[in-house]
Image (cartoon, rainbow, N blue to C red):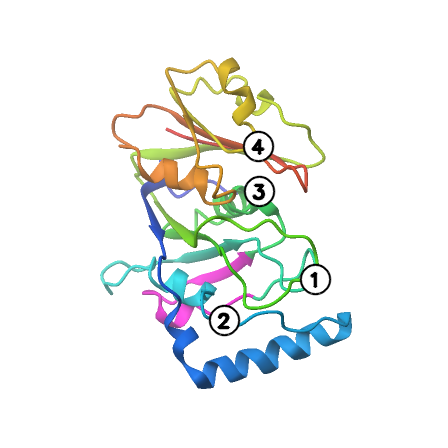
Amino acid sequence: MPALHDDRWGLRRAVSRRYPSPAALAADPGHAARLSTYLTDLLAPYDLTLARDSSSAQSYGEMAVELLPTSPASPVDLLVLAYDVPDVSPGRAVSTYLTHVCPGKPMSFAVSDQGRAAAFTALSLMRTYAATHPRALLIAVEQADLPYDPGVPLSLPAAHAGIALHLSAASPAPLTTVTTLPDAAPSLSVLDGLSATTVILGGGLAALADDVKADRVILADPAQPMTGVWEALAGLDLATAGRIAVADHDPTLHYLCAATFG
């Protein structure tokens, strides 16, 4: 990994958002027609058809745009979108274009096949670009409703939700470690030796909360499997929380993950 731009490169600010209303695009008849055609074509090879309307669906693009910086004075060098709602089968998902509306026209990519580990994987990748892209933004979103039948059993979150992690040099909470272990059982081993003051556990590790050795343990909203831990992070005062560890386990893909700030 190249040397970081600053030894305090990490989390400057975390923002969370819920989306109680349908996306604006859902009320656009032209968009609805295009979406119907697109999804029909996407589903056809799998002998699947549209199962419901789009009246309560959201759009990854619209959700993410509401989390982007709005001022040209806040440019971004690197933008990563993380999500995990398959379109047709596991491992398939539709990405979206965001750089044209993000100040700075940043380099961008998406992580969409890692389940709850998607944001952790994104953070690990983003660290490698910190030397040349120090002003980074990670957006993670999850949808509570889909305008189609994904063709596989799918447990959806309780609410449309998104988070934005603003990362930069000289941050109050440097990103000190990121771990993503595949083919792993639920375990607190990813917290060993981290000396975290505050630990945030996702639903995949909640049952182990009593065994955590930390001054403060926060259980993420279990109804938000991907964004819950980051929503909890957004609720902390980074200046007073001490070293923060965020950890979770994906029960389907069996990733064990942790990230430490501070």
Q: N-terminal of the two: label 2 or label 4?
A: 2
Q: Nearer the viewer, residue 195 or 38?
A: 38
Quadrant for residue 62, please give it.
bottom left
As helix, strand or loop, the secondary structure at mark 4 comes to: loop
Disc number placed over residue 54 in the picture, else none: 2
In the displayed structure image, the side of residue 239 where residue 88 appears, left or right: right
Check disc 2: other Cα within 10 Å, few if <14, some if 14-19, many if 20+.
some
Q: Could you tell me if the residues under marks 1 and 4 are in contact, i.e. CB atoms within 8 Å?
A: no
Between the residue at mark 2 and the residue at mark 4, the CA separation in whole angstroms equals: 30 Å
Q: N-terminal of the two: label 1 or label 2?
A: 2
- Mark 2 is on which residue type? Ser
Q: Position of residue 166 (x, y in %)?
A: 35, 48
- Mark 4 is on which residue type? Gly
Disc number placed over residue 193 in the picture, else none: none
Q: Nearer the viewer, residue 187 or 167?
A: 187
Residue that badge 1 annotates: 151
Q: Position of residue 188 (x, y in %)?
A: 57, 21
What's drawn in magenta, residue-wise?
Answer: 95-110
Residue that badge 4 annotates: 204
As helix, strand or loop, the secondary structure at mark 1 comes to: loop
Q: Nearer the viewer, mark 3 or mark 1?
A: 1
Q: Nearer the viewer, mark 3 or mark 4?
A: 4
Between the residue at mark 1 and the residue at mark 4, the CA separation in whole angstroms equals: 24 Å
Residue that badge 3 annotates: 117
Q: N-terminal of the two: label 3 or label 2?
A: 2
Between the residue at mark 3 and the residue at mark 1, the CA separation in whole angstroms equals: 22 Å
- Mark 3 is on which residue type? Ala
Q: Nearer the viewer, residue 253 or 165?
A: 253
Q: Nearer the viewer, residue 46 or 93?
A: 46
In the displayed structure image, the side of residue 185 where residue 47 appears, left or right: right
